[in-house]
Image (cartoon, coloured by chain):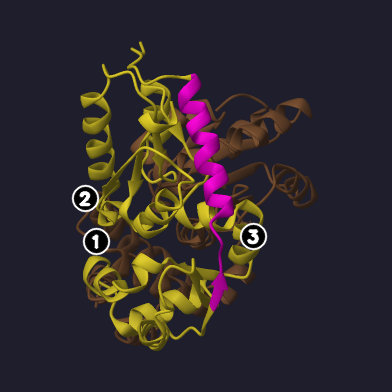
Amino acid sequence: MVHRDWTDRLLDTMISSDRTAAAEIISQALASGIAPMLVITDILDPALVRLGRRWEQETLSLAQGFVAAKIAEDAMLRCIPERTDQYPTKGVAVIGNIEDDFHSLGRRTVALFLAAAGWEVHDLGNDVPAEQFIDTALAVNASVIGASAMMQTTALNIRRLRELIDSRGLQQRLKLAVGGAVFNWRPDLVAEVGGDGTARNAVNADELFMRLQSAARAGGRP
Amino acid sequence: MTTDTVWLSCGVLRAEMEALHQRGLIKGKLLFLDSMLHMDPPALEATLTRLLEKDADTPRCLVLAYGDCCSRMLDLVRRFRVGRVNAINCAQLLLGRDRYRQLMHQEAFLVLPEWAGRWEEIMQHELGLTRTVAHDLMRETRSVLVYLDTGLAPVPAQEMAAFSAYSGLPWQVEVVNLEIMLSQLLAAQNEAQTNPLVEVNFP
């Protein structure tokens, strides 16, 4: 069976929210001799990308989205240990929901997708003060911070994080990715809160974080 | 001035708003929109915009008893110079920021009285969550259901027990008086009175 067929089958289980069947497909793929890393990159990742398109087209329900994320998490937990022994990480990222924001599902999905793409992710959880984002980023030597907010009022709390980054002279070293539903509805908020970039969904987070990391390493603006 | 105030509120707070009105603590006209608009933020935004545009040339004091329930709620406040309660959602309006954050850090799923009677309609029909998926989703992100008892109706123990069984989470009651909500409403009214309702054209 070619990898595309495995992807098709896995995508079907995600759409039908069948976590058990998905686990069985991953087991079969591994049992057939496909390396764990290839299960992630050639089977799981394409399924997630196609799922992301459906999400953008709004043909996916919250329930389907949640179960798909759980299926991806299940698959990663089975495949990542071996993979991380063999492959270096792409970089280090610190993510969290900004102060007063408690909508964790999107952030958790982003963490999952970044980890799947090869990032070392430090997820600080919900209601994270600006200071904690920066202190953690410096402690773990991250060059990208991802701040999530669901609503306009909480998104505006990201301005405090922007101000702190700038006031501490870290704007060249630390890049600020922002995300969450409200940024999709009104992209102008990205600039208003001082974000260096955003992604419409978790699937595109890897590309955004790579771009921002490159900019940070170059010491310039993205 | 206070008798001219229009209180435009989400229907999820109807009982609480009416109680404050009947007690003479807020004066003026009460207007409510269907709480199910919360499930469709663009529709809520369009409805609010229509209502505010309709009254844009009428000089009166208008207060929005809404959280940050659509993507341009703050823009509506600025554009029409209305007052709005300083809360991100209705639960925070009832609890206050500090208690709300405490409960959220305890991973509480907050249940308002109006919502309690229609949990099944929302979780199963609006969100499409089967019992199995709901169990996974709720237990993944929450630890307890907390019913916010505003004292205006008996605690719906039967409904909460059913929701508990469906979600796999235990449930408890948080007694809430309306003092915090009242102070927020009056602060928003004061804001509206200093910025009378008139449309401002933004570039």
Label 1 and label 2: CA atoms lie apart by 8 Å
Callout 3 secondary element? helix
- Chain painted in yellow in the figure: B
Label 1 and label 3: CA atoms lie apart by 34 Å
Q: Nearer the viewer, residue B119 or A71?
A: B119
Contact? badges 1 and 3 (CB < 8 Å): no
Left-right relation of B50 to A155: left
On what subunit does the disc labeled 3 rest? B
Kind of residue indicated by mark 3: Arg
Image mark for residue B99: 3
A75 shown above or below B53: below
B178 in the magenta segment = yes
- Chain painted in brown in the figure: A
Q: Residue at x 28, y 80 (%)?
A: B130
Q: Residues within 10 Å of mark 1 (few under 14, many from 20)?
A: some
From which residue to which does the magenta span run?
A: B173-194
Q: Residue at x 37, y 33 (%)?
A: A186
The residue that mark 2 highlights is: A57
Kind of residue indicated by mark 2: Gln
